[in-house]
Image (cartoon, coloured by chain):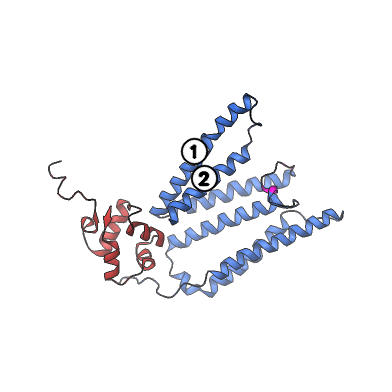
Chain colours: A red, B blue
Amino acid sequence: MNNQLKVLRAMRNWSQAELADRLDVSRQAVNAIETGKYDPSLPLAFKLARLFAMPIEEIFDDGHEGQDDGH
Amino acid sequence: MMDIEPQKRRAPSMVWPIAIGLGTAMLAGGFAGYNQSAAENGDAVLAPWIGPVVAILIGGLALAYYVRRYADWFRNWSPRKRLYWVSLTLSCALGFVAAMVMQSGTSGPEGLFSNAAMTPTVAIGLSVMWVVGLTIALVLYHRTVDDHERRAYHLGGLAGFYAFVFPCPVWWVLWRADLAPPVEAMPLFALSLAANALFYFWFKFR
């Protein structure tokens, strides 16, 4: 799953360790999400959305935009 | 609402905790060496648990001094992160003491997995320490581990499970046909642990 985490982090001039501290997860977790090796759980995705004050779907993109309308 | 800024100060050097760990192992090794030479000379030997316990106590004091010296940095850790590291340190200390006690009186790493006779006191002490200590460490670990590491832990656990269920029956039927030696628990335990560690570290740090 693609995501904007690296861009959003860079816009705030945060290191991976700083973002990890704000989310209360390990730096490896932030790195794995940024590089697409790991998709976060729903609670962590909500935490990210709250931290960046953005909807989850603006941070994460599963590549199926608009295809789920009407099932 | 005021946002709590994460600590921007540089983390203290990791050299000291590593040096303390190595020093602790060397100290315990010194006690083991003393016991070995005393046994070879026919002199009285110390109880096998004395060396590891003294080493752990001194190592623990050194680690406590290190944490105190960088208290400001550690104070900024979240409660989750603090408990997480407590659980890891406790697990390492348990493994270290168990390994040192089991290896005491042997001349190499083979002591860890040998079937050599053990006194009931040492056997009961090790069993109680393993079950009680590991239970406490694991409860703390599972309460504090983050999303990403939980996944690595689960995948590592699955790999460890498969590393047991595939070779175990194969070995057993081969033994029944007299094509293999009798099934032993320790090689299977070691294989399972190795597979677990390999997958855990891969998914955690790749």
**What residue is at 53 percent from the left and 69 percent from the top?**
B14
The kind of residue on which mark 2 rests is Ala
**How far is the residue under mark 2 from the one under mark 1?**
9 Å
Label 2 crowd (10 A; few <14 / some 14-19 / many >=20): many
Q: Nearer the viewer, residue B85 or B173?
A: B173
Label 1 crowd (10 A; few <14 / some 14-19 / many >=20): some
Is B82 placed above or below B196 here? below
Helix, strand or loop at disc 2? Answer: helix
Q: Chain of mark 2?
A: B
Residue sticking out furthest to the right: B42
Q: Position of residue B189 (x, y in %)?
A: 58, 41
Q: Nearer the viewer, residue B83 or B189?
A: B189
**What residue is at 48 percent from the left and 44 percent from the top?**
B157
* Residue B127's disc number: none
Is B13 placed above or below B21 here? below
* Residue B162's disc number: 1
Q: Nearer the viewer, residue A53 or B105?
A: B105
Given contact means CB atoms under 8 Å apart, are the residues at marks 2 and 1 in contact?
yes
Helix, strand or loop at disc 1? Answer: helix
Circle 2 residue: B195
Residue B16, magenta (yes or no)? no
**What residue is at 31 percent from the left and 70 percent from the top?**
B3
Question: How many marks do you count on the picture?
Answer: 2
Dividing the picture into quadrants, the one containing residue B120 is: top right
Q: Position of residue B44 (x, y in %)?
A: 84, 55
B53 relative to B47 in the view: left or right = left
